[in-house]
Image (cartoon, rainbow, N blue to C red):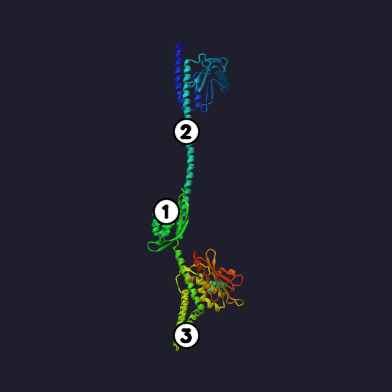
């Protein structure tokens, strides 16, 4: 552009002004640094207003920047508020025309004369908005003024960008802070939860430890150990008590072979069989077995286990093994005591039985004496009767044998003898007892009616013990009829076969009977209603029958008297021939 210099000194002055203005403008970024967009725009407008001696300066931004309004105006005069509004409206009107590409003159809205107005883009392409300035001066805008104007606008753009960046950074930082705070809160919360969980876990663990201690103690007290056997892998887990029972070192691996090495040789085949069938059948099992310990002692155990499938459907057993050695020994001791008691009871009864025994032995003895005398007479006769003597000698021998049989039977019944379990004919045992008691019963005017079944199978048991029970029931029945004089002293002795392969023996008397309220008392030890009674007959009899897996009971008859019966299992598939 061609510049005409009419007044060089004025121009120099002007240029100096301009340079000063430019220097001031260049200092603006320092002032704006750290300012908000609103402050930057306002400061830009104020600077331009005063620096270019404008009447008004107006800015409009396309998008709101921070907290700055989209339109802002500064006017040189007072009453700024009213005029600002008017100027905004006018500028919008002017801008609507042709975007004020070049300066133009308009009527001065602030006075009567005209205004020279010019618009410059705010931002390189006007991307931020537009700045419109106006001055009454005719020479406005001079080239230097346009330079100052656009330079200030561009620097403001940089300031705004920096402010925007800062605001974005601030936003990012605050978002970051927010997220950090939120995450911290979440972590804090999670931490609290975690602490709670840890506390809960510690509580549960403590409880578990307590339960385990209880369990271990209970296992020790009950001498019961537990185990788990995973069949597919033969993995066996044992509780501490089981290690103690087997006397294996705690924690050492347990295998089937190792277990069997402790089993009593007599039970090993059974044990092997059980293990195999448990492997293949997958059914619950329960069996007693013995251990032979290194010191030669024997332990009696009962193993019981429940079969189940694990999460993968593989067979496993969970079970318990109880050491019943103590119980077993106590039972044996009890059985021994009972059998001793039974013997004492038998011996005590011996006195009552003496007459009967005397009769039983006397009969063959007098036969022997008679026959021996006859034999002597026959031999010492003038013509000895040898055939007769032979015959009477034979009878003597027969009676001698009969007497010794009676003695043998008595000895068996009253001697101290270990229990012998054998197959026996109950009818025969009953007959023997009847034979021994016959004369005693007759002495008491008892009318005996035996009804012994023909088809009675063999039973398994101890002959002497069962005969003791039968004898006891017979005597009790006889005792119960001692005072009966108004009716026959009928005594029905019956054996019969019961359904389910059982044999029943019963004694039905016509005695006084018993008070049904005392039914259970009758079987209690030392309960007696007799002057010379001991009250142990029925209690011992009941335990004998129970040890034969049977039962003994009493019932009142429809008529007078009572019936005492016992049932015991027959040997499987056997019959009396
Ligand atoms: P004891 O014969 O020494 O009394 P038991 O134990 O044999 O002892 O009998 C207990 C009691 O049961 C008898 O005292 C009697 O009261 C009652 N009792 C037993 N058998 C009969 C019976 N056949 N009839 C009525 N009572 C009986």
Residue 511: x percent and y percent? 59, 74
Q: Residue at x 57, y 70 (%)?
A: 563
**Mark linked to residue 374:** 3
Question: Can you tell me which quadrant of the image ligand 1 is in?
Answer: bottom right
Q: Real-space Cα distance between discs 3 and 2?
A: 143 Å
User: Does the closest atom of ligand 1 sit within 8 Å of the Cβ of label 2?
Assistant: no
Q: Nearer the viewer, residue 458 or 211?
A: 458
Q: Secondary structure at mark 2?
A: helix
**Mark linked to residue 173:** 2
Instruction: Please tell me which of labels 2 and 1 falls first in the chain.
Output: 2
Q: Secondary structure at mark 1?
A: strand
Residue 295 placement: quadrant: bottom left
Classed neighbour count for the residue bearing mark 1: other residues with Cα under 10 Å, few (<14), some (14–19), many (≥20):
some
- In the image: residue 566, left or right of residue 26: right
- Mark 1 lies on residue: 236
Which marked residue is nearer to the observer: mark 2 or mark 1?
1
Q: Are marks 2 and 1 in contact (CB under 8 Å)?
A: no
The number of discs equals: 3
Q: Secondary structure at mark 3?
A: helix
User: Does the closest atom of ligand 1 sit within 8 Å of the Cβ of label 1?
Assistant: no
Q: Nearer the viewer, residue 491 or 86?
A: 491
Classed neighbour count for the residue bearing mark 3: other residues with Cα under 10 Å, few (<14), some (14–19), many (≥20):
some
Q: Nearer the viewer, residue 42 or 270?
A: 270
- The answer to whether residue 187 shows anywhere in this view is yes
- In the image: residue 329, left or right of residue 566: left
Instruction: Please tell me which of labels 1 and 3 falls first in the chain.
Output: 1
Which marked residue is nearer to the observer: mark 1 or mark 3?
3
Which marked residue is nearer to the observer: mark 3 or mark 2?
3
| 31 shown above or below 542 | above
């Amino acid at each position: 552009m061609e510049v005409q210099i009419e007044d060089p000194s004025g121009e120099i002055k002007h240029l100096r002004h301009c340079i000063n203005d430019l220097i001031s403008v260049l200092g603006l970024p320092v002032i704006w640094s750290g300012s908000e967009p609103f402050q930057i725009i306002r400061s830009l407008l104020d600077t331009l207003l005063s620096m270019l001696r404008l009447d008004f300066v107006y800015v409009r931004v396309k998008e709101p920047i921070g907290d700055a309004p989209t339109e802002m105006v500064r006017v040189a005069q007072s009453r700024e508020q009213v005029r600002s509004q008017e100027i905004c409206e006018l500028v919008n009107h002017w801008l609507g025309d042709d975007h004020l590409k070049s300066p133009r003159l308009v009527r001065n809205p602030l006075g009567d004369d005209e205004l020279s107005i010019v618009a410059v883009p705010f931002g390189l392409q006007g991307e931020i908005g537009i700045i419109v300035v106006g001055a009454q001066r005719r020479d406005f805008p001079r080239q230097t003024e346009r330079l100052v104007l656009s330079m200030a606008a561009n620097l403001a753009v940089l300031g705004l960008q920096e402010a925007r960046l800062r605001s974005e950074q601030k936003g990012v930082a605050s978002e970051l802070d927010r997220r950090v705070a939120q995450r911290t809160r979440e972590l804090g919360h999670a931490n609290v939860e975690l602490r709670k969980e840890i506390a809960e876990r510690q509580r549960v663990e403590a409880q578990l430890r307590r339960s385990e201690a209880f369990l271990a103690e209970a296992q020790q007290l009950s001498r019961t150990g537990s185990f788990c056997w995973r069949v597919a892998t033969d993995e066996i887990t044992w509780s501490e008590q089981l290690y103690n029972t087997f006397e294996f070192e705690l924690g050492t691996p347990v295998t089937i072979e190792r277990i069997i090495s402790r089993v009593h040789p007599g039970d090993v085949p059974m044990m092997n069989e059980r293990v195999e069938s448990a492997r293949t059948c997958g059914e619950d099992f329960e069996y007693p077995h013995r251990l032979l310990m290194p010191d030669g002692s024997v332990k009696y155990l009962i193993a019981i286990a429940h079969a189940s499938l694990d999460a993968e459907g593989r067979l496993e057993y969970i079970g318990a093994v109880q050491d019943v050695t103590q119980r077993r020994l106590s039972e044996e001791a009890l059985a021994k005591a009972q059998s001793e008691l039974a013997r004492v009871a038998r011996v005590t009864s011996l006195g009552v039985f003496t007459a009967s025994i005397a009769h039983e032995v006397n009969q063959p003895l007098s036969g022997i004496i008679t026959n021996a005398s006859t034999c002597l007479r026959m031999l010492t006769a003038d013509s000895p009767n040898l055939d007769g003597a032979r015959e009477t000698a034979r009878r003597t021998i027969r009676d001698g044998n009969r007497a010794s049989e009676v003695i043998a039977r008595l000895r068996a019944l009253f001697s101290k003898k270990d229990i012998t379990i054998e197959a026996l004919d109950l009818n025969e045992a009953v007959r023997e007892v009847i034979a021994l008691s016959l004369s005693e019963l007759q002495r008491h005017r008892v009318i005996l009616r035996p009804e012994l079944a023909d088809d009675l199978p063999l039973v398994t048991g101890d002959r002497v013990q069962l005969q003791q029970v039968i004898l006891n029931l017979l005597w009790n029945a006889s005792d119960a009829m001692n005072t009966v004089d108004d009716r026959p002293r009928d005594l029905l002795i019956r054996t019969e076969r019961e359904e389910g392969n059982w044999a029943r023996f019963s004694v039905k008397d016509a005695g006084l009977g018993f008070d049904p309220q005392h039914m259970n008392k009758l079987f209690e030890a030392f309960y007696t209603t007799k002057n010379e009674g001991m009250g142990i007959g029925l209690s011992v009899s009941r335990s004998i029958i129970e040890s034969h897996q049977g039962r003994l009971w009493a019932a009142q008859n429809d008529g007078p008297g009572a019936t005492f019966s016992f049932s015991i299992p027959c040997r499987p598939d056997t019959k009396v021939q």
